[in-house]
Amino acid sequence: MSLDLRGLTPAPVTPFTRDGEIDYDGIKKVGAWLGGIDGVKGLVVLGHAGEGTFLTSDEQTRVIEAYVEAVKGEVPIIAGITGEGDHVASEETRRAVKAGASAGLVYPSHGWLRFGYQDGAPQERYRRIHEESGMPLILFQYPDNTKATYNLQTQLDIAAQPGVFAMKNGVRNMKRWDTEIPVIREQNPDLQILTCHDEYLLHTMFDVDGALVGYGGIAPEPLIELIKAGKAKDYARARELHDRLMPVTKSVYHRGSHMEGTVALKWALVARGVLEHATVRTPLRPLAEGADRQIADAMRQAGLV
């Protein structure tokens, strides 16, 4: 029986101490807070927001274990699977299973971002990972402006494979979204479709079962309401929530690089009193002077402080 992610699935950050080590007390605080919110369906750790590729394999395992302990069984922990090759990714997935993860969010092999993928390679990646680990898997659709985005047939093939129960779609091309999502829905009616368009939530919220977003790690309460409004086709309420959140969206995600969003997420948690500081690991860099105050002001405007 697959997991039910029909609602909000935040992708929380990985807190660090000021000297750059994993902050397990911070994980306990973040996990206990998010896991205790009604409407949160699971937590995805070790993703982009969680700086998962910046951690050693041992650290990745310990982060999963720490989040599993923090939520105390309230929600499942889902692990980002980011290993470059299929063999490496399968090994990573088996470690995640042993650490207590309930499912895996499978990233494309990162070489595909530059060079593209050969036909059939993504399907094989999901097949091998599931067969060698038994882990339920989430299909991850990358942005259209990368060479790691999957064409429609590839998405349909993966969605039909054993073990694949959900899709995290971040294509960020609304023409493709509007034309491909109905086909995927029709051909795979049991597939749970989750938006990860942190900066396009209003457009995508009416077509999905839920949201799997880093944004959920800082603003879970209004996003849960936004998902409800989308499912009810209540545009007026959805628009109200979207507009309320726009200062936060701009201060966190409308930056020069989407990577800066991870740093901004941590400052938003500082503003909420969840974290004490916004330490990140290189290659991430601190934000420009004053960004912390801007983000705090935006969180106040949205009623989140």
Image (cartoon, grey):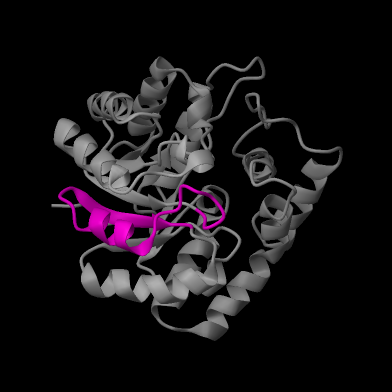
In this view, the residue in front, 257 or 67, is 257
Position in image of residue 289 (x %, y %):
86, 37
Q: From the viewer's perspective, is 221 left or right of 3?
A: right
Q: From the viewer's perspective, is 256 left or right of 58?
A: right
Tally of numbered tags: 0
Task: Give above or below for 82 relative to 159.
Answer: above
In this view, the residue in front, 174 or 136, is 174
Residue sitting at 39 percent across and 59 percent down? Answer: 151
Instruction: Inspect this view and state whether residue 223 appears.
Output: yes
Q: Is residue 155 magenta?
A: yes
Q: Find residue 284 and report its image quarter.
A: top right
In this view, the residue in front, 236 or 178, is 178
Task: Give above or below for 282 relative to 174.
Answer: above
Q: Is residue 64 magenta?
A: no
Instruction: Inspect this view and state whether residue 74 appears.
Output: no
Position in image of residue 74 (x %, y %):
30, 44
In this view, the residue in front, 178 or 254, is 178
The span picked out in magenta is 143-170
Position in image of residue 77 (x %, y %):
33, 39
Q: Find residue 136 and report its image quarter.
A: top left
Task: Give above or below for 79 relative to 231.
Answer: above
Residue sitting at 35 percent across and 48 percent down? Answer: 42
Task: Give above or below for 92 relative to 292.
Answer: above
Q: From the viewer's perspective, is 13 left or right of 95?
A: right
Position in image of residue 71 (x %, y %):
36, 38
